[in-house]
Amino acid sequence: MRSILPVIGAAVALSIGATPAVAQQQRHQHGGHHHQAPKRVKSHVALHVSGHSVLTGGDVTLRGKVRPRGAHRVKVVLSGPEAKILALRTKSNGTFRVKWDAGAIGNYDVTAYGVHDARVRGSHSPARHLTSYRLAGASYYGPGLYGNGVACGGTLEPGTLGVANKTLPCGTKVKLRYRGRQVTVPVIDRGPYVAGREYDLTEATKKALRFPGVGDVMANH
């Protein structure tokens, strides 16, 4: 019996002494989890434009927000007659704001892209649409000419929507605005031939815009 007790005591001592070493080894094996980089979350990007119609040379304010909050890199991409990329950085609350000078006439698509960083995976906003117009002298025609043919083919009638222009190809879609009203119509004829006037509106187009007959309209061509 006396010979067995020392053996048992030694075994217990070994087991007690091994416990801290095993725990230390386990901490060493699993400790790496505490130093992993935070998992990226998918960002949400919102974009708003101050107006969908602007005269060429005018400013458009582009503003938006990236979630989650924080300072993020953003690219605002404008595609259209004048392609441009605006590189921005959001404020700490995730918002951004920039002005763009609409220098070229035509239709634009504007999209904001959130750029990958340590916290977020990049995403993009829905595309916003805007049109840069110029002022163009206009008049109208129609009464007394109904039943006559037009240069681009077809017959002029009271309900015909379209414009006459001296140079734009037949069928070109022209977007016109007048005091908040808007219409998109094709080029159907040639004219006008009066100095200072670039478009002749059919009577139906004139009525759709509530255009008085002679004056300036906003045109995207």
Image (cartoon, rainbow, N blue to C red):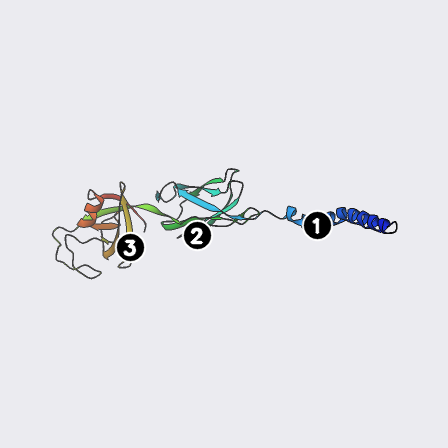
Residue placed under numbered mark 2 in the picture: 83
> Measured from the top left, where is residue 46 in percent x and y?
43, 44
The residue drawn where x is 53% and y is 44% is: 72
In the rendered structure, find residue 173 and report the number of the disc placed on it.
3
The CA span between labels 2 and 1 is 58 Å
Query: Mark 2 falls on what kind of element?
Result: loop
Residue placed under numbered mark 1 in the picture: 26
**Near-viewer residue (121 or 75):** 121
> Measured from the top left, where is residue 215 in percent x and y?
24, 43
The disc labelled 1 sits on which kind of residue?
Answer: Gln
Q: Is 129 left or right of 8, judged from the image as shown?
A: left
**Near-viewer residue (186 or 139):** 186
The disc labelled 2 sits on which kind of residue?
Answer: Ala
**Near-viewer residue (37 or 15):** 15
Residue 155 against residue 106 in the figure, above or below: below
Please report whichever mark, 3 or 1, sits nearer to the chain's N-terminal start: 1
Category of crowding for the residue at label 2, using alpha-carbon neighbours closer than 10 angstroms: few (below 14), some (14–19), many (at least 20): few
The residue drawn where x is 28% and y is 45% is: 177
Query: Mark 1 falls on what kind of element?
Result: helix
Please report whichever mark, 2 or 1, sits nearer to the chain's N-terminal start: 1
Category of crowding for the residue at label 3, using alpha-carbon neighbours closer than 10 angstroms: few (below 14), some (14–19), many (at least 20): some
Q: Mark 2 touching mark 3, by CB under 8 A?
A: no
The disc labelled 3 sits on which kind of residue?
Answer: Lys
Q: Mark 3 touching mark 1, by CB under 8 A?
A: no
The CA span between labels 2 and 3 is 21 Å
